[in-house]
Image (spheres, rainbow, N blue to C red):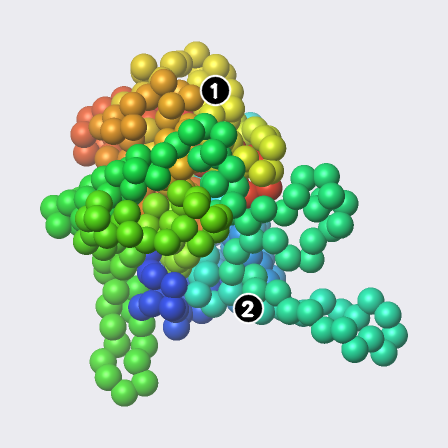
Amino acid sequence: MKEAYVCEGIRTPIGRFGGSLSSVRTDDLASVPIKYLKNKLPKVDWGKLDEVFFGNANQAGEDNRNIARMALLLSELPTNVPGITLNRLCASGMEAVIAASRMIKSDEGSFVLAGGAESMSRAPFVMPKASTPFSRNAEIYDTTIGWRFVNPKMKEKYGIDSMPETAENVAEKYQISREDQDKFALRSQQKALKAISTGRMNKEITFVKVKQKKNDDLHIDKDEHPRETTNEKLSNLPTPFKMNGTVTAGNSSGVNDGAAALIIADEEAIKKYNLTPVAKIVCAASSGVEPSYMGIGPVTASQKVLKKSNLSLDNIDVLEINEAFAAQVLACLREFGVSDNDERVNPNGGAIALGHPLGMSGARLVLTAAKELEITNKKYALCTMCVGVGQGSAIILEKV
């Protein structure tokens, strides 16, 4: 079996909801990291790409009609290059990387692009068609995040808790206190701000040009979601998702915009195109859990991938776990037997600080982890995420 390697990769800054990237169409945003890689590697024969895999969770607005294909065409890659969009909700971008690696390992490809994009700011409202002739009953759904067009059988069997409500469920079941959630959130913000101020984040970000009607174009080159805060400020935030709950806007991930892309290649393509391998993709796995406790998904997914890789958490040097909510991250860490403030966990901050553009986040985790292995000269990284409707995804990288 061939090996698959993460090579060059890049991402956009992550914008706040309604922020600096909100005027950029989703398909245009998705093309930004592809254009960057294309321009950085002009001698590569891009017509030889076997596939472009992109993750995207919404697909109800400008990300419809297969955003992978749209983005590669907008990037002016040759028209013979195919593209496919994958949807595992929050883990869609990670699933794109996994699909690319499996394509290479099964010898069905050699040179692949994988990534993800989401503009949650631009997610549209949608209306269902009338169920009866001349119906005057009109419904409208916000597609930014969460349930819509609910199947009554799903609601009856599994409930339709919102994502924050599932976090409250996890916090109650695993006895994760509000105080511990806020402490974790503060550490995430502090680590992210440090990574920005030291230039660490510059190693994985390219700018997005945002056109202005009257003034000069803006060049957005820094993550917009991180913010200065304190334990006191976090502790004073309301808990809108449950009376006397523990989950707040401050200890949850953001609603955001962003895109990322990575080159996944085998040794032959690396030599042929003079690529720089950063990390080998060791193994990947996914798992299912109860939808109302979706945040615990990283536990079973990570257990599966570690077992397949003949590794344990003691072997892991970098642990990138998506911070959908502090409650679920802490529950997962404690199930792992890892301390709340283990220095291996999200060393540059996580989604609570950086934001969580759904389809992009999994690719961002892989990119950030690969860069961290390269910069710190560590050996193994585990990236893992919870997924809406009750799943978990995980992937292990090994530094080259």
- Of the residues shown, which amino acid type is indicated by label 1? Gln
Within 10 Å of disc 2 (Cα), the crowding (few <14, some 14-19, many 20+) is some
Residue at the image position 45 percent from the left and 69 percent from the top: 25
Residue at the image position 58 percent from the left and 38 percent from the top: 292
Q: Residue furthest bottom?
A: 214
Residue at the image position 61 percent from the left and 65 percent from the top: 141
Mark 1 — residue? 303
Choose between 167 and 94: the one closer to the eye: 167
Choose between 172 and 160: the one closer to the eye: 172
Disc nearer the start of the sequence (1/2): 2
Relative height, residue 233 to residue 121 (above, below): above
Residue at the image position 45 percent from the left and 28 percent from the top: 174
Q: Which mark is residue 124?
A: 2
- Of the residues shown, which amino acid type is indicated by label 2? Pro
In which quadrant of the rendered view does residue 222 lie?
bottom left
| Left or right: 315 in relation to 331 | left
Relative height, residue 126 to residue 237 (above, below): below
Residue 79 placement (x, y as % from top left): 53, 59
The reply to whether the C-beta atoms of the residues labelled 1 and 2 are less than 8 Å apart is: no
| Left or right: 134 in relation to 47 | right
Local secondary structure at mark 1: helix
Choose between 78 and 161: the one closer to the eye: 161
Is residue 383 at least partly visible in the picture? no
In which quadrant of the rendered view does residue 28 lie?
bottom left
Local secondary structure at mark 2: loop
Residue 47 placement (x, y as % from top left): 47, 52
Residue 159 placement (x, y as % from top left): 66, 43
